[in-house]
Image (spheres, rainbow, N blue to C red):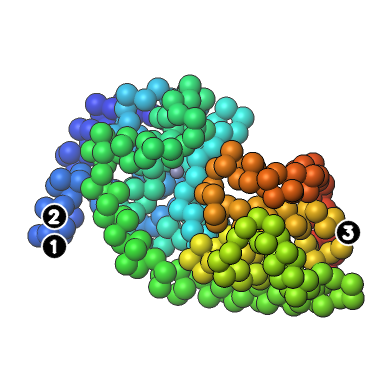
Amino acid sequence: MELESSQKGQDKIASENVIPLEPLEEALISQAAVISDRLDVTSRDDAWLNALVQRMRTTYFADVPQVYPIVAHFGRRAHRRFGSIGARNHTSILRLNGLLADPEVPLYVLEAVIAHELAHYAHGFGSGLTRRHAAPHRGGVVDKELEQRGLALVAERAKAWIEREWEAFYQSRCADLLREAQAKQKATEALWREFLAAAGRRTLADIEQEMGYLAARIGFFGPLPKVEWLYATQKQKAPSYWLPKRQVLHLHGLLADRRVPDYFVQFQIAYWLTRQKEGAKWSAIQPKLWEAGLRSITQQALDWRHRWNLFVMKHHPQKKAK
Ligand SMILES: [Zn+2]
């Protein structure tokens, strides 16, 4: 792809005609320097997108060396992800949610997403540049970068539009995907119910009894938390989760399978009870478990943890249905 020098890019944008806008919008834009409103848009295809990305780059990120060339394209429709950037074969692939090609999405939303990804690029993610941060979003580094480059207002406008409009927009465009997701969820729930109802499973009554016994050993005298089976997706790999708002312990449904050792289940319960008393630090939790005589359970459970991951991969009810 041919690249404009930053100076040429700036001149070109400044000399182009501005589409008339509402006074308030115009005021915002004169501060935010939204450039895509000045691009001649017929339809938002990949060629148009690449031109916009290059404009954004030469206008706001001209000082960032281009180690990997950037190729942009509209990807699949997505609910939560607006954009991503990653390297493949020494090329930086900038992907935008396919829904952003819809003319109803304001151009400043696309600009904000592109700016966000270009900030990652500048920080060494997907660009071949040296990484400037250990994690792409830690400490608000992207927001800071956008602010320094005069892109904070564009980002703010985009955020406001997304908060106001995105959900309804998504539902209007993706009824098919929503129906699919709903059907999939129902099927998953049915699989889990069948799994949990099979003969020989641990029941919630078994778990509650165990919890009562462990609570006494630990010295947990408050009302016992509620326990529910988690109809886990294959991405939810942790054996247990704590839901602080509802004060509910979620146990992965596969813990009902008696091939999972008792000590592994007991440890999940003991861990969360102790954590309610002692706080989240393992260095505070571990001595209390040992004091309660649960040292061997704890050690065995920690040893079994890697087996758990294999167990989930092998025995997840969705796995068998396939
Ligand atoms: Zn990001």
Of circles 3 and 1, the one toward us is 3
- The numbered dot on residue 279 is none
| Residue at the spot of label 1 | 22
Q: Is residue 118 above or below residue 180?
A: above
In the rendered image, residue 53, in percent from the top left (x then y), is placed at: 38, 40
Helix, strand, or loop for circle 3?
loop
In the rendered image, residue 183, in percent from the top left (x then y), is placed at: 66, 76
Q: Is residue 165 above or below residue 266?
A: below
In three-dimensional space, the C-alpha distance between marks 3 and 1, rounded to whole angstroms, equals 66 Å
Comparing 136 with 5, the one in front is 136
Quadrant containing the C terminus is: bottom right
In the rendered image, residue 255, in percent from the top left (x then y), is placed at: 77, 62
- The numbered dot on residue 259 is 3
Which of the 4 image quarters holds residue 262? Answer: bottom right
**Three-letter amino acid code at the position of disc 2:** Glu
Helix, strand, or loop for circle 1?
loop
Q: Residues within 10 Å of mark 3 (few under 14, many from 20)?
A: few
Query: Does any portion of residue 112 appear in the rendered image?
Result: yes
N-term-proximal mark, 3 vs 1: 1
Comparing 69 with 281, the one in front is 281
Q: Residues within 10 Å of mark 2 (few under 14, many from 20)?
A: some
Comparing 205 with 234, the one in front is 205
